Amino acid sequence: MTRLLLHTAVATALAAGTLGLTQPARTSSDTASSDGVHTLRVPDGDPNERSLAPRTTEPFSMTGVTWDDPEAALEGTAHVRTRSRESGEWSAWRALDTDVRTPETGPDRHRAGVRGGTQPLWTGPSDGIQVRVSGERLPEGLRVELVDPDGGSDAVHSTVVEPDVAGPAAGVPP
């Protein structure tokens, strides 16, 4: 029961935090907070396909993809695979639920900083991620949100990842 409550609390924190319901998005120069969220921007480019190469990240146990416009829908697919902190093995590709609009109603719907997003996915203790998003016309401002429920005040970061800067994590198969 305690584990279920923890998972529910973390999922709620991810949805509220990454959608901008609790505070605005951070940049790498912002001071740390206690919400344990690490953000990676998915490089812009092709309007139908975007990806984030495999990379080592700060520790996390939950992930999701968000985008700038909460009214926009991701009409396509979003897949992630993660690297286990314990074994170092990469998971199989897992689909994120993109058929969601949060918040659908309520006073925060039109608040500045609210973002659209997938449902969060519990990954277990992880330290690496790879992302593939495809669809008819992808929303602008795609980001990968990594949540560490055990993260403290030093766990909040925002990193811009550009296509020519991002390289595969060491030892990651293509």
Image: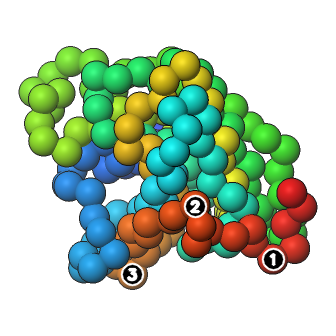
Depth check, front residue: 6 or 164: 164
Give how far across and how far down residue 33 sits, in percent: 28, 72
Callout 1 amino acid: Ala
Tags 3 and 1 in contact by the CB under 8 Å rule?
Answer: no
Q: From what the image shows, is residue 127 above or below residue 1? A: below
Callout 3 amino acid: Asp
Nearer the camera: disc 2 or disc 3: 2
Nearer the camera: disc 1 or disc 2: 2
Give the alpha-carbon distance from disc 1 to disc 2, as whole Å.
17 Å
The quadrant where residue 100 appears: top left
The residue lying at 41 percent from left, 31 percent from top is 139
In the rendering, which numbered label is found on residue 163?
2
Which quarter of the figure is the C terminus placed in?
bottom right
Give the alpha-carbon distance from disc 3 to disc 1, as whole Å.
25 Å
N-term-proximal mark, 2 vs 3: 3
- Reading the image, the residue beneath label 1 is 170
- Reading the image, the residue beneath label 3 is 154
The residue lying at 51 percent from left, 53 percent from top is 43
Q: Secondary structure at mark 3?
A: loop
In this rendering, does residue 97 appear at all?
A: no
The residue lying at 48 percent from left, 23 percent from top is 137
The residue lying at 23 percent from left, 39 percent from top is 114
